[in-house]
């Protein structure tokens, strides 16, 4: 393949003849490493037409470069970068560029500074990765996902792959969500009440942007999903953290001036507590009395392998005030970034318009692949397999925690994929995590989940979605031993 002719252009202010300018342009490309040995140059006719010069001018430039050993001519095949062309010189490192912009004044808004916990990029190389939300490659159905992806690349689905949906979504994915996913949660919704998002976090961001202003108040759980707190901080609304208990968010503690309540009733993040049915009704009644909206992040409802999941808040809602957030990123794999919003049509209409102005729509190939994976039954098989495996791992981990005298601080009666833990009040779990990394053990310190930086220092989360059962007992033992050595 020849070097693209668009790579070449003449500087109208350059000195020298056109022939010398063309020679210099090609020589500089070789000396800077942009053109590699063996690459083919555009034909003299094509380059002359592109540059707007006579063909003989390009031919003479090429001939001079052949004589200088920059190029070689191969009969009727054309001109190529010579195998003996000069190599690009090894320039010394340039001094740092001086940045004369005062970014403290130039930035209109700031989005850094959050405390969302991060995982090492090489987390999978650790022997005891008690991390949350990562995919276990031994459980995921690679073969069928690949087949669905290939099918979505086929001629029959060419439109779904290449079309600009503008503000719409893949009709097959919407159909499956409406007819199969939502009814399992007791939710009935029309097409105009469902929007596909780039995961649950994108759904929460879109919701906050549409519902909240600087004059409005949002109530959140404490501790909570750290990224949600960052999203609300960026929206500049008033935020009221509400301490959770064994049943999740206590409705009676929500301030009367609240406009939007964010909650994770299925598996509270990060404690894994499940909101009782009675409290769900109390929350809806409280929201009705305050004329507030409720955003339900139905976090890990698929992982209710110990008991049947409680009905979704959205299914109990008779006023249209609950906005439902669902995601396939946790149940399939986090890199998928595929979720959905369910709400009243006027709300979805506004969110759809906002999404269109930011990213238009979720890539069509991802949506169609997911639609096939869901509709062909692979998703349900995967969830069953994951549930069986996580149940066994939970049993092993529960026994290991009890054996080594560690303390569980959250009650997960329905399942999930993590334990919320608590140490002595003097324990600094950030320091604990640092020591454990040296022993190839990963945990999540708890302070990032709390509204106050001074709270949660003795808490930590242990995920078991990515660690084999055979390593759990040894890993928990290392955690207990390290805590003991920290006094």
Image (cartoon, rainbow, N blue to C red):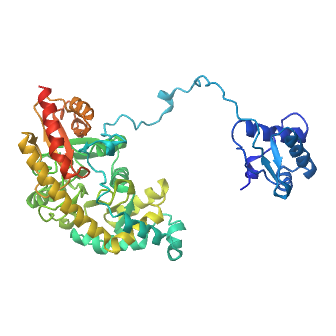
Left or right: residue 225 versus residue 308 is right
Q: Quadrant of residue 86?
A: top right
Q: Quadrant of residue 455?
A: top left
Q: Is residue 189 above or below residue 214?
A: below
Does any portion of residue 222 appear in the rendered image? Answer: no
Q: Quadrant of residue 383?
A: bottom left
Q: Nearer the viewer, residue 133 or 405?
A: 405
In x, y percent, where is residue 486? 15, 26
Name which residue lies at 13% across and 65% down.
308
Left or right: residue 411 versus residue 297 is left
Name which residue lies at 88% across and 48% down.
58
Q: Quadrant of the N terminus?
A: bottom right
In x, y percent, where is residue 430? 23, 31
Name which residue lies at 13% across and 55% down.
275
How many numbered marks appear? 0
Name which residue lies at 22% across and 70% down.
184
In x, y percent, where is residue 140? 32, 61
Left or right: residue 51 versus residue 471 is right
Residue found at the far bottom of this picture: 156
Q: Quadrant of the C terminus?
A: top left
């Amino acid at each position: 393949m020849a070097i693209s002719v668009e790579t070449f252009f003449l500087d109208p202010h350059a000195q020298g003849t056109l022939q010398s300018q063309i020679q210099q342009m090609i020589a500089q490309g070789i000396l800077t490493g942009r053109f590699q040995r063996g690459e083919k140059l555009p034909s003299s006719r094509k380059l002359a037409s592109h540059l707007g010069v006579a063909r003989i001018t390009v031919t003479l430039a090429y001939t001079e470069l052949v004589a200088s050993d920059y190029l070689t001519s191969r009969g009727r095949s054309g001109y190529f970068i010579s195998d003996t062309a000069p190599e690009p010189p090894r320039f010394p490192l340039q001094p740092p560029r001086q940045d004369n912009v005062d970014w403290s004044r130039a930035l209109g808004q700031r989005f850094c500074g959050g405390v969302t916990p991060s995982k090492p990029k090489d987390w999978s190389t650790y022997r005891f990765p008690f991390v949350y939300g990562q995919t276990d490659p031994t459980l995921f159905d690679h073969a069928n996902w690949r087949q669905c992806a290939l099918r979505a690349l086929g001629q029959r689905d060419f439109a779904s792959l290449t079309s600009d949906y503008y503000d719409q979504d893949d009709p097959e994915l919407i159909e499956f969500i409406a007819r199969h996913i939502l009814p399992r949660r007791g939710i009935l919704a029309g097409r105009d009440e469902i929007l596909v998002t780039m995961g649950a976090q994108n759904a929460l961001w879109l919701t906050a942007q549409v519902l909240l202003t600087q004059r409005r108040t949002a109530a959140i759980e404490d501790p909570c999903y750290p990224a949600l707190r960052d999203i609300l901080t960026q929206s500049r609304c008033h935020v009221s953290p509400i301490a959770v208990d064994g049943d999740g968010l206590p409705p009676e503690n929500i301030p009367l001036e609240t406009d939007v309540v964010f909650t994770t009733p299925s598996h509270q993040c990060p404690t894994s507590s499940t909101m009782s049915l009675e409290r769900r009704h109390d929350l809806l009644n409280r929201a009705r009395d305050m004329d507030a909206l409720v955003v339900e992040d139905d976090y890990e409802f698929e992982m209710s392998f110990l008991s049947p999941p409680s009905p979704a808040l959205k299914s109990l809602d008779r006023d249209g005030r609950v906005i439902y957030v669902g995601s396939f990123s946790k149940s399939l794999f986090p890199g998928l970034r595929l979720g959905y919003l369910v709400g009243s049509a006027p709300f979805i209409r506004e969110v759809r318009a906002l999404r269109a102005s930011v990213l238009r729509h979720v890539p069509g190939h991802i949506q169609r692949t997911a639609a096939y994976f869901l509709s062909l039954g692979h998703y349900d098989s995967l969830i069953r397999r994951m549930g069986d495996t996580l149940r066994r791992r939970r049993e092993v981990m529960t026994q290991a925690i009890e054996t080594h005298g560690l303390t569980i601080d959250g009650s997960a009666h329905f399942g999930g994929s993590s334990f919320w833990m608590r140490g002595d009040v003097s324990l600094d779990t950030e320091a604990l995590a640092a020591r454990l990394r040296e022993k190839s053990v990963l945990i999540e310190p708890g302070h990032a989940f709390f509204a106050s930086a001074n709270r949660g220092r003795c808490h930590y989360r242990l995920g078991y979605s990515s660690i084999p059962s055979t390593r759990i007992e040894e890993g928990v033992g290392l955690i207990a031993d390290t805590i003991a050595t920290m006094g």
